[in-house]
Image (cartoon, grey):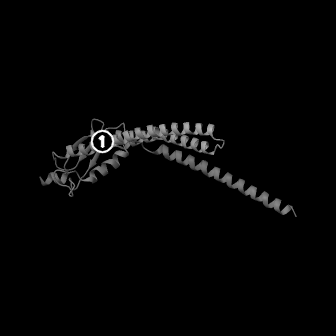
């Protein structure tokens, strides 16, 4: 009577072991294939086209050049320009400088509007950085306060539930302050570096061949 369950259990164990072996084999071979594929990839720096000074060329063909929904004095460039530039700049390493080439006729208002857009975004990131600093300080102070209340509660009360709860809340608050200071602040600083690079990039105008022929 006991042989059948034993055989079933042994067959189940063997099947599990075989499945684990197949999974390990597939994972190992998939990892090897992935590594081989990664070795064939060209780095982002080598993919980029560069000018004579070594700056990465980003060519944009704005149409229209200005946002048709905005007029003076709130005139601004077509937001598709900023969107396309942000998408392309995201793939370019931060160590590389950017040279933006606009395939349109020269307009003296373009460069000031371009710089104003990214300067305003930088000011917004600076506000985020200040808020991050205040958030870190408040969370840290809250953690120390809860930790002190937890210690006093444990001494004054025979029941340790409230003290343990406050201790957990204090630990969570202090951990959130560390997370805000290290991870969130690093993310904001990386975004600010990207904005600085775009705000001070070189901008030139290069009309398309068709436009030159019409002139």
User: Residue 85 versus residue 104: which sits nearer the camera?
Assistant: 85
Rendered view: 164 above or below 84: above
Residue 34 on image: x %, y %: 53, 48
Give the left or right position of residue 51, taking residue 147 as reference.
left
- In the image, 175 versus 145, the foreground residue is 145
Q: Quadrant of residue 194?
A: top left
Query: Between 163 and 183, which is closer to the camera in this rendering?
Result: 163
**Quadrant of res 138:** top left
Which residue carries the number 1 mark? Answer: 123
Left or right, 192 with reference to 26: left
**Crowding near pointer 1: few (<14 within 10 Å), some, many (20+)?**
few
Say whether residue 93 is visible: no
Secondary structure under the numbered disc 1 in the rendered image: helix
Q: Nearer the viewer, residue 183 or 209?
A: 183
Q: From this viewpoint, which residue is outermost toward the left?
A: 215
Q: Report how many numbered discs are placed on residues in the image.
A: 1
Q: Is residue 171 visible?
A: yes
Residue sitting at 55 percent across and 43 percent down? 169
In the image, taking residue 139 as reference, residue 207 lies left or right, namely: left
Considering every residue shown, the one lying at the far front of the view is 156
- x then y, percent, for residue 168: 58, 43
Identify the residue at image location x=50%, y=47%.
Answer: 37
Which of the 4 image quarters holds residue 91?
Answer: top left
Can you give x and y, in whole percent of width and height, for residue 58 in the image?
A: 29, 45
At a point 83% along the width and 63% down the height, the residue shown is: 4
Instruction: Please state, as top left, top right, bottom left or bottom right, where the N terminus lies in the image.
Output: bottom right
On the rendered structure, is 151 left or right of 180? right
């Amino acid at each position: 009577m006991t042989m059948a369950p034993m055989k079933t259990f042994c067959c189940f164990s063997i099947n599990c072991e075989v499945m684990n072996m197949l999974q390990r084999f597939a994972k190992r071979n998939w990892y090897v294939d992935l590594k081989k594929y990664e070795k064939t990839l060209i780095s982002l720096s080598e993919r980029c086209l560069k000018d004579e000074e070594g700056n990465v060329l980003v060519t944009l063909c704005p149409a229209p050049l200005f946002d048709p929904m905005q007029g003076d004095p709130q005139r601004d460039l077509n937001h598709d320009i900023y969107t396309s530039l942000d998408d392309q700049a995201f793939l370019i390493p931060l160590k590389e400088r950017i040279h933006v080439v606009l395939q349109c006729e020269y307009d003296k208002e373009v460069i000031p509007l371009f710089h104003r857009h990214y300067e305003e975004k930088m000011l917004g990131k600076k506000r985020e950085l200040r808020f991050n600093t205040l958030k870190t300080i408040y969370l840290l102070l809250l953690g120390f306060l809860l930790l002190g209340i937890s210690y006093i509660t444990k001494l004054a009360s025979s029941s340790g539930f409230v003290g343990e709860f406050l201790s957990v809340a204090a630990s969570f608050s202090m951990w959130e302050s560390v997370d805000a200071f290290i991870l969130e602040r690093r993310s904001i600083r990386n975004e600010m570096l990207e904005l600085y690079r775009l705000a001070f990039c070189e901008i030139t105008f290069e009309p398309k061949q068709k436009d030159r022929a019409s002139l």
